[in-house]
Image: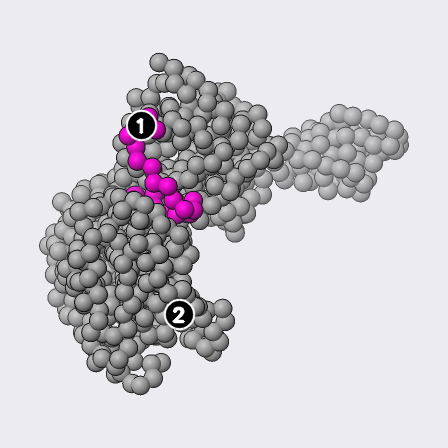
């Protein structure tokens, strides 16, 4: 049967199992939106295309499926760009579909024409410019395959308006043949043997688990490796959930704002087993002094990450879960009691500085609020954040027991990610509570999507950590720029009134004893609720490894509470 | 030192742009890049020469593989390969100098492909060194303009090129990758 290009697009999306798309229509995508009415795919009308991109991203991260965002040509497509880059840097599978001017107008600066494939070339895993209807089905089929396999990432399909209208026979490809795209599967046996030798020889090993651990669904095999070899597990920001936080072998988050005992363990280790992580500068600090005594095994699906930042002794290229499953039978039980004792000493020292144990001084601290949210949700919520101080405190104090529960922008550090990503995560996971912990700066960047949340009846609980600053930049200014707060003080609206204007109940919280009643109120109210926590303005995230400094050279929170916080 | 890589890529619009964009984005320092047809109409062949003092050839290779349109990457550096560059050199040549220039060219197995009243064009094919040498000898006459194709390369006989294969380490032979 002959179908229009637009119909073929929806038929193809149906075959890829798409249930929801996020987007905004425009002149160059009207045929797509017109055809959409015939298909049972839910469209979420966002208020800005950046919101659509982050929603699709949040949906993908929480569901493990491919997210889809739709935009029109020109400004519609360029508004996606921040969201595409965010997905690219965090390796999330999102297919972006953009309308484009008629193929015969391309290159002529037509109304709302922008070279979208050119603009997005360096921030997509792959992209397509479609000028004929019969190219649509193969492109969609390939795009979904490329987006979700190997190291996942965003793929963009730019479809000319005349291709949307043109009629052609619809045939969905039964198999994909991409001669230049063959994701590696597993490593050869002799290398696995070598890895086992190195692991058995180590006295002070440590596992570094990254986002790849979750993407590859390798949690079980990682935990098995850790337990068999008594190897502690440190996680990157996006790797949180790979090992339950309550497990004695879990060291929590590593890096710039990682736990001090975690960073010390890395620096003192004699073997690093890096799993699906890329030695980002936020994780390593100064490369010259990074884990100087450690041999390094790197299991990674993307060969270009090997030796990129840190030279490794043994790279194993392949799918993490497959490689580890092949490696585990070669691994014998080993014990590292002394090493673990040493780490426990460091951990106890860290605990003595923990702000959670500070007496009530009449102020609210974000760390405590997040700790209370963790308690109130039994650690089971899907927690979404913006970017900044609140994000780091969320990573430190919301102790994730399970994977896919922490939805946050890592590599790109995209402020404004929170509100739309929370809505996307809610579409992916309606079994668990979805909480958005946001900063007042981040929240205001995409506040408009509150409206979308209400239109969709999304049950998202919003907790704003309101310190009237762009807090993370303020912290850097305090530490490294002599407290010159340039461009960081921030006034915001009355967020409770903003919520009310959207028909969302809200509360303002200023005292510690008000936290629990507010969280209970949020939990017991159907639909979205906004809690505006007025927190200490000049608190800082500790520990902190200054950018480019040695990983062990951390700025620590003072041991005892004093009147003035350093 | 120079590294010479051969990349087989799908002959599709925008592929050259993807490769060039990759080099720019990753800050790779490329000495020359040559693109041409192969025996298969749907496959193009790129010969890429990188300055390996500043750019690690293995990283170039691993990143090239990330492009969906790149099919194969071979390293022919230091291998039994035929490597050729072609140059056209327009040189000032008065009537009295033509014979001398023709002589020099023929020593290098070059030839004169155009003669004008005041200049000639010398065509020369060969390795980079050879072309450099002739260029230096022609310089005293006054080079008006010059163009070089950049290197193209092909392995001799049945020799197999080196495929570091993605993930090649710096120490040892753990280069193998099993593909699906």
| Whole-percent x, y for residue A398 in the image | 22, 62
> Is residue A237 or residue A515 the one in the foreground?
A515
| Whole-percent x, y for residue A345 in the image | 18, 74
Can residue A208 be seen by looking at this rendering?
A: no
Q: Earlier in the sequence, mark 1 or mark 2?
A: 1
**Mark 2 — on which chain does it sit?**
A
Picture layout, residue A416 above or below residue A301? below
Which residue is at 49% across, 28% downward? A160
Q: CA distance from mark 1 to mark 2?
A: 45 Å
Which residue is at 31% across, 23% downward? A175
Picture layout, residue B60 above or below residue A198? above
Q: Secondary structure at mark 2?
A: loop
Residue to which mark 1 is pinned: A39
Q: Quadrant of the N terminus of chain A?
A: top left
**Disc on res. B51:** none
Left or right relative to A130: residue A527: left
A55 within the magenta span: yes
Q: Number of marks in the image?
A: 2
Picture layout, residue A177 above or below residue A317? above
Residue to which mark 2 is pinned: A468
Tell me where the magenta segment starts and ends, as one range. A37-62
> Is residue A529 or residue A250 the one in the foreground?
A529
Circle 2 residues within 10 Å: few <14, some 14–19, many ≥20? some
Classify residue A392 by image quadrant: bottom left
A496 within the magenta span: no
Q: Are marks 1 and 2 on the same chain?
A: yes
Which residue is at 40% across, 28% downward? A34
Q: Are marks 1 and 2 in contact (CB under 8 Å)?
A: no
**Mark 1 — on which chain does it sit?**
A
| Whole-percent x, y for residue B6 in the image | 49, 34
| Whole-percent x, y for residue A102 in the image | 53, 27
Circle 1 residues within 10 Å: few <14, some 14–19, many ≥20? few
């Amino acid at each position: 049967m002959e179908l229009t290009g637009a119909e073929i697009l929806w038929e193809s999306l149906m075959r890829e199992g798409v249930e929801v798309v996020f987007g905004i229509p425009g002149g160059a995508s009207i045929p797509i939106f017109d055809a959409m009415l015939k298909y049972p795919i839910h469209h979420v009308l966002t208020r800005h295309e950046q919101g659509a991109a982050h929603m699709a991203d949040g949906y993908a991260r929480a569901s493990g499926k491919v997210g889809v965002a739709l935009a029109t040509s020109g400004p519609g497509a360029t508004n996606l760009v921040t969201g595409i880059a965010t997905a690219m840097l965090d390796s999330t599978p999102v297919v972006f579909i953009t309308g484009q001017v008629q193929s015969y107008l391309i290159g002529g600066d037509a109304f709302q024409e922008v070279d979208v494939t050119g603009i997005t070339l360096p921030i997509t895993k792959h992209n397509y410019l479609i000028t004929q209807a019969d190219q649509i089905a193969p492109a969609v089929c390939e795009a979904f395959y490329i987006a979700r396999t190997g190291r996942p990432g965003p793929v963009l399909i730019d479809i000319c308006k005349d291709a949307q209208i043109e009629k052609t026979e619809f045939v969905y490809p039964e198999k994909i043949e991409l001669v230049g795209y063959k994701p590696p599967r597993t490593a050869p046996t002799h290398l696995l043997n070598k890895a086992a030798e190195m692991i058995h020889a180590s006295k002070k090993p440590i596992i570094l688990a990254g986002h790849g651990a979750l993407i590859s669904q390798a949690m079980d095999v990682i935990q098995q490796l850790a337990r068999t070899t008594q190897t502690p597990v440190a996680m990157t920001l996006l790797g949180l959930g790979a090992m339950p936080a309550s497990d004695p072998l879990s060291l929590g988050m590593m890096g710039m704002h990682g736990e001090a005992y975690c960073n010390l363990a890395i620096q003192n280790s004699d073997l690093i087993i890096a799993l699906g992580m890329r030695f980002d500068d936020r994780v390593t600090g100064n490369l010259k002094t990074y884990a100087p005594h450690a041999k390094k095994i790197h299991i990674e699906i993307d060969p270009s990450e090997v030796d990129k930042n840190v030279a490794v002794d043994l790279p194993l290229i392949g799918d993490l879960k497959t490689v580890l499953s092949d490696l585990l039978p070669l691994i014998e039980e080993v014990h590292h009691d002394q090493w673990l004792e040493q780490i426990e000493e460091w951990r106890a020292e860290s605990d003595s500085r923990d702000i959670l144990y500070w007496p009530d001084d009449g102020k609210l601290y974000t760390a405590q609020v997040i700790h209370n949210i963790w308690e109130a949700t039994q650690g089971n919520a899907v927690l979404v954040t913006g970017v900044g101080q609140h994000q780091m405190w969320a990573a430190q104090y919301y102790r994730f027991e399970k994977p896919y529960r922490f939805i946050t922008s890592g590599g790109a550090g995209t402020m404004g990610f929170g509100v739309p990503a929370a809505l996307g995560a809610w579409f992916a996971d309606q079994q668990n509570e979805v909480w958005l912990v946001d900063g007042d700066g981040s929240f205001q960047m995409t506040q408009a999507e509150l409206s979308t949340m209400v239109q969709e009846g999304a049950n998202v609980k919003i907790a704003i950590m309101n310190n009237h600053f762009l807090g993370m930049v303020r912290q850097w200014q305090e530490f490294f720029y002599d407290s010159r707060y340039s461009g960081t003080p921030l006034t915001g609206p009355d967020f409770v009134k903003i919520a009310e204007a959207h028909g969302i109940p809200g509360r303002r919280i200023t005292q510690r004893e008000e936290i629990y009643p507010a969280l209970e109120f949020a939990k017991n109210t159907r639909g979205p609720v906004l809690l505006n926590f007025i927190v200490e303005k000049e608190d800082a995230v500790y520990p902190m490894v200054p950018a480019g400094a040695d990983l062990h050279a951390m700025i620590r929170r003072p041991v005892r509470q004093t009147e003035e916080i350093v | 030192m120079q590294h010479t890589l051969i990349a087989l890529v799908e002959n599709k619009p925008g592929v050259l742009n993807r490769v060039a964009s990759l080099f720019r984005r990753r800050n790779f320092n490329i000495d020359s890049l040559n693109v041409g047809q192969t025996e298969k109409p749907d496959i193009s062949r790129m010969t890429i020469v990188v300055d390996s003092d500043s750019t690690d050839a293995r990283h170039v290779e691993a990143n090239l593989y990330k492009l969906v349109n790149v099919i194969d990457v071979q390293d022919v550096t230091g291998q039994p390969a035929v490597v050729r560059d072609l140059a056209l050199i327009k040189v000032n040549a008065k009537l009295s100098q033509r014979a001398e220039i023709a002589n020099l060219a023929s020593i290098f197995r070059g030839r004169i492909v155009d003669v004008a009243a005041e200049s000639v064009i010398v065509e020369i094919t060969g390795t980079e060194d050879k072309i450099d040498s002739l260029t230096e000898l022609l310089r005293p006459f006054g080079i008006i303009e010059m163009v070089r194709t950049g290197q193209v390369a092909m392995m001799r006989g049945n020799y197999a090129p080196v495929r570091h294969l993605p993930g090649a380490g710096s120490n040892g032979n753990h280069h193998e990758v099993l593909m699906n």
